[in-house]
Image: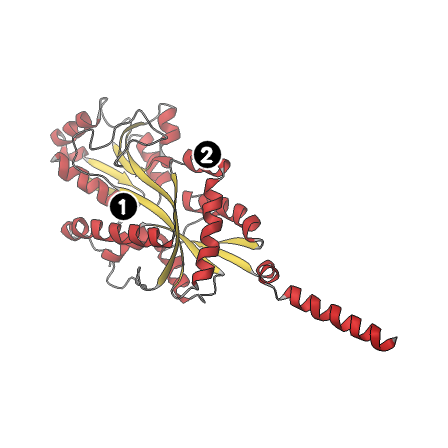
Amino acid sequence: MKRRLFAASTALALAALGALSSPAAVAQERTLRIMVGFAPGGSVDVVARMLADKLRVSLGQNVIIDNKPGAGGRVAMTELKRAAPDGQTVALSPSGAMVIQPWLYANLGYDPVKDFTPIARVVTFDFAVTAGPGAPQGDLRSVLAWMRANPAKANYATSGAGTVPHFAGMMLGQNAGVALTHIAYRGGAPAAQDLIAGQVPLMVDTASETIEHHKAGKLRILAVTGEQRSRALPDVPTLKEMGMNMAADAFFGLYGPAGMPAEAVARIDRAVAEALRAPDIQERIEALGLVPAHGASADLASTQVAHLRKWEAPIKASGFKAD
């Protein structure tokens, strides 16, 4: 009897160990860390937290957001480069850190293609050209004509130097034949505050920074920079509709360190795709002026390469260097 009880208890113990070492059990014990290179409350952080809520359920494991603000997202991406490629550390990055900054820094700290594993494209978005009370009434053509006649007032604000809005505004001025002066702020919120106060007449940045002020009548979004009109602003024309031969858009991508196993990439990508199909997530993302746009690993990789090529010439032509 004692031998039978010992054998039974041994079998149960071995079964328990086997259950703990199963993929599902291992996943439950481990934590997925999503790094965000910006402070809490911004659009990248908000989207990351939306995903985390869904991924906790679909992946069956703990998911945390680790904010690593600084240097326009480069702090987070540099740390991601050094992380173990075990599928437990990823980063949600806006495209600027991956397609704009490589052309600005001689010592970026990472190779945007070789040092990371693309996991999933999450959202796409364009930008809004917004006028404040410091600009005259009328459409974008009228405002640009006023700036052409008043060069001392031909300023535009953005959330920072070396960003997509910075170069989009530069290209806007070139297309319109206006020498626009860039004024860089430390974030979209302070730029929008000065726009409302009439300190600067024009702003180029994500629609999320000005859309509520636009709806309240405090500001006027005159155009969007995408190839098509924004779902959130269906009555606002694109720059191309306004006669400007240009477009500028961006994306958020989820990346892991280089060498991340294909099965880990596929597992997280499936969870991201499922999350982005959820109606509540779609509604909340669109309220930010973003577009849910899931793309698998290969889609994100090709999108990134296309944007790298697109921005190379205008950035080099501008002569702007961040270091």
Residue 224 in picture, x, y percent from top left: 27, 33
Which element type, helix, strand or loop, lies under badge 1?
Answer: helix
At label 1, which amino acid type do we have? Val
Can residue 185 be spotted in the picture? no
Does 195 sit left or right of 54 as displayed? left
In this rendered view, identify the residue nearer to me: 77 or 299: 299
Q: Position of residue 304 (x, y in %)?
A: 29, 52
Observer able to see residue 293: yes
Which residue is more in the foreground, 229 or 166? 229
Q: Is residue 280 above or below residue 51?
A: above
The residue carrying mark 1 is 164
Q: Within 10 angstroms of label 2, few (less than 14), some, or many (20 or more) residues?
A: some
Quarter of the image containing the C terminus?
bottom left
Q: Which residue is labeled 2 in the image?
A: 283
Circle on res. 149: none
**Amino acid type, residue under disc 2 in the picture:** Glu
Nearer to me, 194 or 46:
46
Q: In the rendered image, which quarter contains the N terminus?
A: bottom right
The residue depicted at 79 percent of the width and 71 percent of the height is 8
Q: State the image quarter where residue 124 is shown.
A: top left
Q: Is residue 32 left or right of residue 178?
A: right
Disc 1 from disc 2: Cα separation: 25 Å
Q: Name the residue furthest bottom.
A: 3
Q: Dot 1, how many residues are within 10 Å of its Cα: few (below 14), some (14-19), or many (20+)?
A: many
Q: Residue at x 29, y 53 (%)?
A: 302
Q: Which of pointers 1 and 2 indicates the residue nearer the eye?
A: 2
Provide residue 60's location: percent of width, then percent of height. 58, 53
Q: Which image quadrant is residue 287 in?
A: top left
**On the picture, is 1 further left or further right than 232?**
right
Residue 64 screen position, x and y as percent: 53, 53
Sequence-first disc among 1 and 2: 1
Residue 296 to residue 127: above or below: below
